[in-house]
Image (cartoon, grey):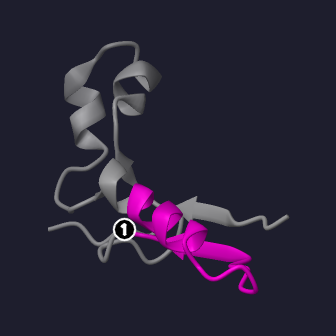
């Protein structure tokens, strides 16, 4: 059994719309002035980890947009 933990940073999904109860303006503000990750970026990490040879286990992948230094530090234009 192999287990991989994938920790994405800001990913543009419908979650922000749900989080702000359908308020699209507030949801879009989350990503304003920066380029977030997209679902495809995270899926690519999953695919990569899952396709390593059987003797290789990827313990953890931390993937963030280039504009995001930490969970709370984001460089915005």
- Residue drawn at the location 29% of the way across and 32% of the way down: 27
Estimate the x, y position of residue 74 in percent, counting from the top left. 36, 68
Question: In this orientation, which residue lies closer to the viewer: 49 or 10?
Answer: 49
Relative to 41, 4 lies left or right:
right
Q: Eyeballing the image, is 57 above or below 77?
A: below
Magenta region includes residue 54: yes
What percent of the width, then of the height, locates residue 3?
78, 64
Q: Residue furthest right?
A: 1
Percent of width and height locating residue 33: 16, 59
Is residue 68 rendered to the left or right of residue 72?
A: left
Query: Residue tagged by mark 1?
Result: 74
Image quadrant where one finds the C terminus: bottom left
The x, y position of residue 1, in whole percent, is: 85, 64
Residue at left offset 44%, top offset 78%: 69
Q: Residue at x 34, y 61 (%)?
A: 41
Determine whether, in the image, residue 36 is placed left or right of residue 21.
left
- The magenta segment is 42-64
Q: Residue at coordinates 59% horizontally, 79% vertically from top-left?
A: 52
| Count of marks placed on residues | 1
Work out which residue is located at the far front of the displayed protein and give it.
54
In the image, residue 21 above or below residue 41: above
Q: Residues within 10 Å of mark 1 (few under 14, many from 20)?
A: some
Of residues 27 and 8, the one drawn nearer to the viewer in this rendering:
8
**Side of 5 where 14 appears, left or right:** left
Q: Is residue 51 above or below residue 46?
A: below
Asked whether residue 15 is in view, the answer is yes
Q: Is residue 62 magenta?
A: yes
Say whether residue 72 is visible.
Answer: no
Q: Secondary structure at mark 1?
A: loop
Judging depth in this view, the residue of 60 and 29 nearest the camera is 60
Instruction: Specify the quadrant of the image occupied by residue 62.
Output: bottom right
């Amino acid at each position: 059994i192999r287990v991989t933990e994938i920790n994405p940073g800001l990913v543009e999904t419908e979650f922000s719309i749900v989080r702000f109860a359908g308020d699209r303006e507030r949801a879009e503000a989350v990503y304003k002035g920066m380029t977030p990750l997209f679902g495809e970026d995270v899926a690519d990490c999953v695919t990569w980890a899952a396709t390593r040879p059987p003797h290789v286990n990827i313990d953890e992948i931390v993937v963030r947009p280039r504009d995001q230094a930490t969970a709370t530090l984001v460089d915005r234009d």
